[in-house]
């Protein structure tokens, strides 16, 4: 904070000053802010005015306040910043980004060269009929109603539009804890309050979900399989238990995020059947490539109508070229074979790391998906020590809400079996050498 001086003559001025600091890169993600009283002294405002400014910043998702940790800049505040991302050191192995293996993705250049599309003009249907028909078949095969569908620019875009259709700033949303960091950022940026729900390897715990609903959550967002970051997946029994909890709150908006889609290596068990307010996304990013910003959104007729109406007021539609490309890839038998092989490869790589960690007594989870979640005593120390050994992993803090134990996330998408052994050995050594800490 000695490098950035806040200037403000009002609560709005304080908001503007801190946002400018984030935008310039002088206030870094995660950076702790002084206390309310200290800021008040520095800028010459009353503590009440400073508190009002910080409250507005919290509502916008720029800052986060946590018990015993004070107020800090969010890990990914919704402010465009000039600050350059942290570079990966030369020679280091980057396992932090959550990307699929490029070698297991389709050849988009070839697919585009073979793609034939008519020119599309204003006023034509927003979604390609053949794409929604194929997506509907996939969803029905997984037990998800597909009477109302639309195409959105990725899973988070669909989730945001559904939330905007039903919720207002200040509403509470039940979320998995730990959960997807980008989702947390989105909810905070929309002024929504996160209600954490503890989970295990089978997904949300029913008792924890019940507690969140009793605390006033008017919506819940669930990852049915490949949960990020833990790899949890609902089985049939857990899905029924969660559905029973939701049955006691019939007006709760339930959103399922199937971000793995066809790449998932486990069956999908849904909780949305029979609900009056629901939505389910299916993304293509992990199976076909992150740059294909497209997802299918299913839901009750009112929700989908509202999303479509809001789309018409903005972008209008997702590019028909992109829709045509996804349809072409989805119906190609060779691409289906490629995705099937990728599923098996990811499962083997994930299990190899879990086995090597287990042999060394290191607890971890990762039943499905592209990541393994590993408990550690202290995140910063573990991340730093692994970096010294040439491994770049993701700290768990952005994925955790309060009362969730410290951990790190390792993306296994490109991790070879030999690397899994070395990483497990290094991590076990790091955890053994870590000094014990005491907190009051």
Image (spheres, rainbow, N blue to C red):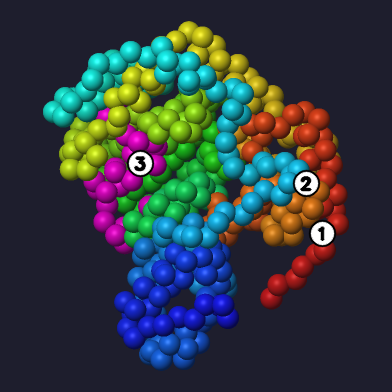
The image quarter in which residue 303 lies: top left
The image quarter in which residue 201 lies: top right
In the displayed structure image, the side of residue 350 where residue 220 appears, left or right: left
Residue at point 47% right, 88% down? 42
Residue identified by numbered label 3: 157
Q: Quadrant of the N terminus?
A: bottom right
Q: In the depicted view, which residue is nearer to us: 197 or 291?
A: 291
**First in sequence: mark 1 or mark 3?**
3
Residue 318 coordinates in the image, percent (x, y) = 29, 32
**First in sequence: mark 2 or mark 1?**
2
Residue identified by numbered label 2: 390
Give the number of the mark in front: 3 or 2.
2
Q: Which residues are magenta?
A: 145-173
Q: In the depicted view, which residue is nearer to us: 351 or 185?
A: 185
In space, the residues marked 1 and 3 are separated at their CA atoms by 41 Å
Q: In the depicted view, which residue is nearer to us: 291 or 380?
A: 291
Residue identified by numbered label 1: 434
């Amino acid at each position: 904070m000695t490098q950035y001086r806040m200037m403000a003559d009002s609560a709005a001025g304080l908001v503007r000053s801190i946002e400018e600091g984030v935008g310039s890169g002088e206030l870094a993600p995660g950076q702790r802010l002084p206390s309310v009283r200290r800021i008040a002294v520095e800028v010459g405002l009353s503590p009440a005015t400073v508190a009002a400014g910080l409250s507005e910043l919290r509502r916008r998702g720029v800052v986060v306040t946590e018990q015993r940790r004070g107020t800090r800049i969010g890990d990914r505040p919704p402010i465009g910043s000039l600050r350059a991302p942290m570079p990966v050191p030369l020679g280091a192995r980057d396992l932090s980004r959550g990307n699929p293996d490029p070698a297991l993705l389709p050849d988009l250049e070839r697919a585009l060269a073979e793609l034939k599309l008519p020119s599309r003009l204003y006023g034509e249907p927003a979604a390609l009929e053949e794409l929604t028909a194929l997506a509907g078949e996939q969803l029905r095969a997984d037990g998800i109603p597909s009477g109302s569908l639309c195409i959105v620019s990725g899973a988070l875009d669909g989730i945001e539009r559904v939330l905007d259709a039903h919720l207002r700033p200040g509403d509470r949303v039940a979320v998995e804890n730990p959960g997807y960091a980008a989702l947390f950022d989105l909810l905070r940026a929309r002024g929504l309050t996160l209600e954490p729900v503890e989970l295990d390897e089978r997904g949300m715990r029913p008792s924890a979900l019940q507690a969140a609903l009793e605390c006033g959550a008017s919506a819940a967002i669930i990852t049915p399989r490949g949960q990020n970051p833990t790899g949890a997946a609902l089985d049939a029994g857990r899905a029924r238990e969660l559905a029973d909890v939701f049955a006691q709150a019939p007006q709760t908006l339930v959103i399922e995020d199937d971000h793995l889609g066809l790449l998932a290596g486990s069956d999908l068990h849904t909780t949305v059947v029979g609900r009056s307010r629901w939505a389910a996304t299916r993304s293509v990013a992990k199976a076909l490539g992150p740059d294909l910003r497209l997802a299918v959104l299913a839901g009750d007729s009112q929700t989908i109508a509202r999303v479509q109406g809001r789309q018409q007021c903005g972008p209008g539609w997702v590019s028909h070229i992109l829709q045509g490309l996804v349809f072409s890839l989805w119906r190609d038998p060779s691409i289906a074979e490629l995705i099937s092989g990728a599923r098996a490869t990811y499962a083997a790589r994930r299990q190899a790391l879990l086995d090597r960690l287990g042999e060394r007594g290191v607890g971890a989870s990762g039943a499905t998906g592209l990541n393994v979640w590993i408990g550690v005593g202290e995140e910063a120390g573990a991340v730093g020590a692994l970096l010294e050994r040439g491994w770049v992993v993701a700290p768990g803090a952005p994925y955790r809400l309060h009362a969730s134990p410290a951990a790190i996330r390792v993306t296994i998408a490109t991790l070879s079996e030999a690397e899994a052994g070395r990483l497990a050995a290094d991590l076990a050594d790091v955890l053994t050498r870590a000094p014990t800490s005491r907190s009051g």
